[in-house]
Amino acid sequence: MFGDNQIFAAPLAGITDQPFRRVIRQFSPYAPLVTEMISCHSLVGQHKNCVRNFDNYANEGNVGAQIFGADVGLMADAARILQDAGAKWIDINMGCPVPKVATRAGAGAHLMRDHKLAEQIMRAVVCAVQIPVSVKTRLGWDDEHRDWGELIKIAADCGVQFAALHGRTRAQLYLGEAVHPDVRDMPIPIIANGDIKSVSDVEQMEKLGYCGVMIGRGILGRPWLLSELQGGEKPKNVGEIVLQHLDYVVEYYGERAGVPMFRKHAAWYSAGMPNSSDFRIKVNRIDSASLLKVAIREFWGII
Ligand SMILES: Cc1cc2nc3c(=O)[nH]c(=O)nc-3n(C[C@H](O)[C@H](O)[C@H](O)COP(=O)(O)O)c2cc1C
């Protein structure tokens, strides 16, 4: 069974922000958590509208900061800034398939097509920081180019310490089932990612030579999942956790921005429960934190 530093929370843009990481942390004090992807341009340019550009990770424990971009110098600068902000390691995004990142910015999954640029970025980032550097990538660009092994060997040569491998190609986006190749021959530790949700999935990954697993969508509405995969109990006081998560979101973003952002979390927490669709409809009409708390208390029966 993997140890508590081998079950990672995946980077999820718009989701694994500081408030959500704070909630996950309560269940998994040592788990490696990855931030949402951070643009090297917005970070180095200190864009004021991007609140997460100013996060301080020093008190967050084992947190890796994920950067994306195609500019070698800015990626190195971004890595330095995040190291100074207390990140425990830097992760380079080499798998994001969305057109804004992979096509227009030439970053994310595009780096799987341009190994030369990928290599320059990895070398520059590794040189820029004293903390470990990892990459997160996919099986390849499409079915004809499943060259993940080659990219991982280049990464190892650049001094990258480990890689997370999402078992899909860029062309698959998030469709179809993830396939996890045997990685026992790889020169650096590989973390399995994609559709891993149960203890038996985790055990299967161990057999294939992975050194850990990374969970993405499984943690939506279940911030305790990483701990559950290691034998922890599902909490009984879910409503209290939802209230606390809301408090963290409001503290971080303010009420006006935070309440609308919290709606998706409320929907995930309530998924599959009786009357959850009525709850979702109600929550989507609420703009104030105090009314949202009343609705949450009512739904989870908290007096
Ligand atoms: C809403 C959403 C946001 C994501 N954001 C990121 C991101 O910022 N960086 C990244 O490397 N991957 C991102 N991913 C991909 C996930 O980290 C993960 O690789 C993918 O969801 C497969 O794992 P899963 O089946 O456990 O969810 C995102 C996926 C989703 C669904």
Image: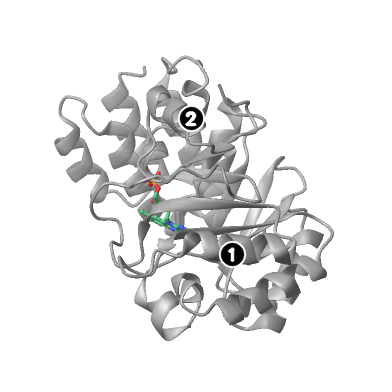
In the depicted view, which residue is nearer to us: 46 or 30?
A: 30
Q: Residue at x 30, y 62 (%)?
A: 173
- Give me the C-alpha separation between circle 1 and circle 2: 41 Å
Where disc 2 sits, the SS reads helix
Q: Position of residue 57 (x, y in %)?
A: 72, 50
Residue that numbered label 2 is attached to: 207
Residue 52 vs 111, above or below: the answer is above
Residue 230 vs 63, above or below: the answer is above
Residue situated furthest front in the rendering: 185
Q: Quadrant of the C terminus?
A: top left
Q: Position of residue 85 (x, y in %)?
A: 77, 59
Quick one: label 1, few (<14), some, or many (20+) residues within 10 Å?
Answer: few
Where disc 1 sits, the SS reads helix
Residue that numbered label 1 is attached to: 51
Q: Amino acid at mark 1?
A: Val
In the depicted view, which residue is nearer to us: 205 or 220?
A: 205
Q: Earlier in the sequence, mark 1 or mark 2?
A: 1
- Ligand 1 closer than 8 Å to the CB at disc 1? no
Q: Position of residue 276 (x, y in %)?
A: 19, 33
Ligand 1 lies in quarter: bottom left
